């Protein structure tokens, strides 16, 4: 799978978000807001294959969430209230509890998982243009494209450049 990004633009937005949210994060909600900002920017500056965005089935930009996501309703409210559009499309969310349910999405946020589930997920979507985002340290080296983790009281992320290209 090939993703092309305007690297300097992505770096600019990442640094902007990091600057704005550089104070230590003390609660889950603040952490969630920072991750939401990153997810939106990653999606905005990632280039999907043309056929993926032109498909008549995909009139919306669909973000899938795998696993329990207690703040899932909040992320939908933020995107809806701020009228966030990605690639000129309305953003919608799909929630998945089973690996085999994952289908017709542009991005997948992988919440809680064990190594077996992660392998199954990555195998299932390996030939599809789906950007994967995780929240477990070390998942980047296992094949996830973008991985958030907390180090101390700060949110960090790693990008698996091999998986992204």
Image (cartoon, grey):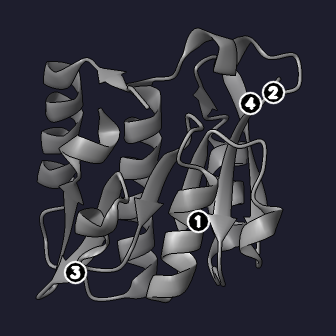
Question: How far apart are labels 3 and 4 at the CA level?
Answer: 30 Å
- Answer yes or no: is residue 112 visible: no
Q: Position of residue 86 (x, y in %)?
A: 58, 28
Q: Quadrant of the N terminus?
A: top left
In the image, is 6 to the left or to the right of 133?
A: left
Does label 1 or label 4 sit earlier along the sequence?
4
Does label 3 or label 1 sit earlier along the sequence?
1
For numbered disc 3, what is the local secondary structure? Answer: strand
Q: Which residue is mark 1?
A: 121
Q: Quadrant of the C terminus?
A: top left
Q: Which residue is mark 2?
A: 58
Residue 58, image quadrant: top right
Q: Which residue is mark 3?
A: 150
Q: Are marks 1 and 4 in contact (CB under 8 Å)?
A: no
Question: How far apart are labels 2 and 1 at the CA level?
Answer: 21 Å
Q: Are marks 2 and 4 in contact (CB under 8 Å)?
A: no
């Amino acid at each position: 799978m090939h993703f092309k990004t305007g690297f300097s633009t992505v770096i600019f937005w990442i640094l902007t978000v990091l600057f704005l949210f550089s104070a230590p994060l003390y609660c889950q909600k603040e952490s969630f807001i920072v991750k939401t900002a990153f997810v939106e920017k990653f999606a905005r500056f990632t280039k999907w294959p043309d056929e993926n965005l032109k498909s008549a089935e995909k009139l919306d930009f669909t973000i899938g969430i795998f696993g329990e996501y207690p703040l899932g309703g909040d992320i939908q409210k933020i995107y809806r209230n701020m009228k966030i559009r990605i690639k000129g499309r309305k953003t919608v969310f799909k929630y998945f509890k089973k690996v085999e349910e994952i289908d017709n999405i542009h991005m997948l946020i992988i919440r809680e998982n064990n190594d077996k589930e992660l392998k199954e997920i990555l195998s299932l979507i390996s030939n599809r243009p789906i950007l994967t985002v995780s929240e477990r340290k070390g998942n980047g080296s296992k094949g996830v494209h973008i991985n958030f983790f907390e180090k101390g009281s700060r949110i960090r992320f790693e990008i698996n450049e091999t998986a992204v290209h």
